[in-house]
Amino acid sequence: MERNKNNQLLKLGEICMLKLTSGAVISGVLIGKAENVIKDKIEVCYRFVISRRQHIDLLEDEIEQVMYSSGQLEKIEYFKEFEKKYGVKCFDSDDTLLPASVIMGDVLIGNDVWDKLTETERIEYISKLELEDKDVVELIKACVMIRKENEKLYKDKEKILNATLELTEKYREYTSTNSYAESIYELIFKELGIGKFIKEIC
C-alpha cells in the first residue's frame, strides 16, 4: 500500500485525529515512531496516547487519513491566504503543505516577499512555519549556493569590464593619431552599439 502523504503531518507531541482503514476514528497525542524490518519490508509504527492510562500502536498502513487539529487547520488557512496574497507556492499538487524550508526559500529568494512584510507579519510568518533544524540546514545550503553564484557573476562581470576598458583605451590611442577617428567612432560606437554596451556594463 502506498504511504499516506498526510502522515508527514504527524508530529511528536501534537494532538491529531485519525481515520483508520477499519473505519474507526480516534484522537490522541503522537509520542513515538518506530521503523521495523519484517521480511525485507520496512514497517512504520506510530504510538498514540489516547487517555491517561491507554495508548495504541498503529501501523502506517492502518492509517487512512490524518485529520487536522485546530492548530493545524489554522496553519493551513494562514498559508492558503499567504499563497493567494503574495503568490508564494505553499502547497503541492495534492494540496499538501510544502516543507517549511521550501516555502521560506521562495519568500527570501524566489519572490522577494520578505521585504514586503512588516515586522509583525515577519514574526507571525516565522511562527507559523515552525522551522525545524533540518529546515534551517536547507536554508543555509540555499544561501551558500546563492552566494557562490553571485561571486561567479561578479568575477564574470569584472572580466568583461576589464576587456571593455582595454578596448576603450586602445580606441583612444588610435584616434589620437588617425584623421579618420570621427568616422571610426560613428561605426563602432554608434552604428554597432558598442558605446551603449559599454555604458550598460560600467
Image (spheres, rainbow, N blue to C red):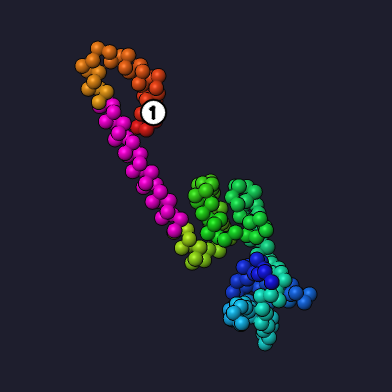
Place of residue 164 in the rendered image (x, y in percent of width and height, measured from the top left): 31, 31
- Callout 1: 10 Å neighbours few (<14), some, many (20+)? few
Q: Residue at x 54, y 47 (%)?
A: 111
Q: Is residue 168 above or below residue 120?
A: above
Tell me which corner region of the image, top left, top right, bottom left or bottom right, holds residue 80. Answer: bottom right
Q: Is residue 14 above or below residue 124?
A: below
Q: Nearer the viewer, residue 48 or 138?
A: 138
Name the residue at the left extreme.
Answer: 177
Instruction: State which region is magenta.
Output: 141-169
Name the residue at the top extreme.
Answer: 179
Place of residue 117 in the rendered image (x, y in percent of width and height, measured from the top left): 54, 49
Place of residue 181 in the rendered image (x, y in percent of width and height, measured from the top left): 28, 15
Horizontal relation, residue 102 to residue 93: left or right: left
- Identify the element where label 1 is drawn: helix
Question: Does 149 lie within the magenta span?
Answer: yes
Q: Main secondary structure of the magenta part?
A: helix
Q: Which residue is mark 1?
A: 197
Question: Does 69 lie within the magenta span?
Answer: no
Q: Residue at x 37, y 46 (%)?
A: 152
Q: How many marks?
A: 1
Q: Quadrant of the C terminus?
A: top left
Tell me which corner region of the image, top left, top right, bottom left or bottom right, holds residue 77. Answer: bottom right
